[in-house]
Amino acid sequence: MPYQIDDTHDPKLESWVESANDPETDFPIQNLPLCSLSVGFHEEEEKSDRHIVGDPFVRIGNSILNIQECFKDAGVMSGCGFNVLADVQALASLDSTSRGLFRKRLSEIFSANNPKRKEWQERVAPFLYDVNNLDDEVFEWVTPICPRDYTDFYASLYHATNVGSMFRPDNPLLPNYKHIPIAYHGRASTIVPSGTPVRRPWGQLIEGNVGSESRPTRAPCKLFDYELEVGFVVGRGNERGEPISIEEAEDHILGMCLVNDWSARDIQKWEYQPLGPFLAKNFATTVSPYIVTMEALAPFRCPAMERPAGDPTPLGYLTSEANTASGGVDITLEVFLSSAKMREQNIDPVQLSKGSFKDMYWTIAQMLTHHASGGCQMNPGDLLASGTVSGPTRGARGCMLELTWDGDPFASPPVIVPGTQRTPIKLPTGEERKFLGDGDEIIIKGYCEREGFRRIGFGECRGVIQPAVG
Ligand code: MN
């Protein structure tokens, strides 16, 4: 594994940025995640086009540092082996050694105990901004990377088994599942930053079960859903035709973020066979503002999920000792819902689920290795997402499709019920939800904790649902 625990993870490290020392912050000096903001004066019209590459920033406490300005004017990065960083994509293109030096230098700059502290503090101060006091005429948050390509996997055995049980009770898992990290190619064009409203899509819908006599109508989606996912961003790419080995895979990953793969279940039900999701998932995908780097995640690595007894061993190109021993990442993930009525009545969002990314059947290294194994070119900044993160218990299910479903193939004995039998979630306002309503906001949070280390967080991935057009 290219990412080791070092001085930058020392839990005793404190920063001269006071807010970074707050025990509650997601962004202590041990984290230092990357984010992007478009900097300049904006016309209102321009603000609606959000698929833009921003300047690279790093977040610490309640502040963000403009790395590009820092490189140009503060001269604090000399000795790191590179001296220009146009955007986060450019950082992704570097090898892990250079990225390690970059992290080390940032850690030194922000450290409260460094002998050069005063000098560095003075040099970076002009490029450090308080996030609670940003002039929104000048700064606009954009997606942390602007991927050219986006792929969404299906790497949770629990999610795949739950969903499979609804539609194929006798045969929930297809024969390929335990051999191939399954995925579909999504749309980079509709990836939006956290906070962007998401409009309910129109599509072809079928009443009842899909059969040879089915005749669709075109209407707004009725079964609107979110999917709790973790994204990982490609660092260095590969040449077309040249695979990435499982041993090298993590060296090609920049870091991780939170993803909401909004899904129209009724559109999906009719269109997904035989080639997979299409309009059900290509209208919006929300990503969190920060990429937590693989370097920052080093203390929170864990073994890959232990395969249940009797499961096949993956083929050789998807297997390595290091991947089995530490290919997992223990990220606690929580999802909250707030309806429009709850916000009117000042009621806090309710928690829908809590789970961990360590419960994924396939690791990020296996997903990337398989993706490139046929010769597919991966580019710096490409976004890969894990698929819905669900765990073994009902409270760890990562979408409404699973949460409100009454079946439980992991109970003992297993409870398999038809896909339509659901218990709604009751909200404090008396409202009920089997799927999501207009005005509902979904908030995803993620964080890593381990005894002996500082807790680090991913920030939030949010989006409010707007009614369908017309
Ligand atoms: Mn998905």
Image: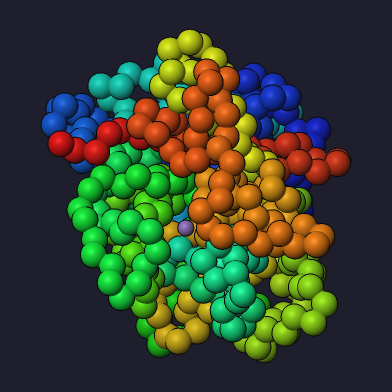
Q: Position of residue 287 (x, y in %)?
A: 44, 45
Q: Locate residue 199: give its quadrant.
A: top left
The percent coordinates of residue 48 (x first, y second) are 20, 35
Identified at 28% across, 67% down, the residue is 214
| Residue at the (56%, 51%) spot, across then down | 421
Nearer the observer, 407 or 460:
407
Examine the rendered structure and indicate whether residue 312 appears above or below residue 449.
below
Q: Looking at this view, is 124 or 265 the one in front?
A: 265
Foreground residue among 52 and 190: 190
Residue located 26% across and 45% down the image: 220
Residue 305 falls in image quadrant: bottom right
From the viewer's perspective, tell me whether residue 35 is left or right of residue 42: right
Give residue 313's position: percent from left, percent from top.
73, 84
Q: Residue furthest top?
A: 345
Q: Quadrant of residue 144?
A: top left
Residue 367 shows in the view:
no
Looking at the image, which residue is at 37% across and 40% down?
193
Residue 117 in percent (x, y) is at 64, 27
Q: How many numbered markers are drawn?
A: 0
- In the image, 49: left or right of 416? left
| Residue 140 against residue 367 in the figure, above or below | above
**For residue 433, above or below residue 176:** above
Q: Quadrant of the N terminus?
A: bottom right
Q: On the rendered image, what quadrant is the C terminus found in?
A: top left
Q: Is residue 93 left or right of residue 280?
A: right
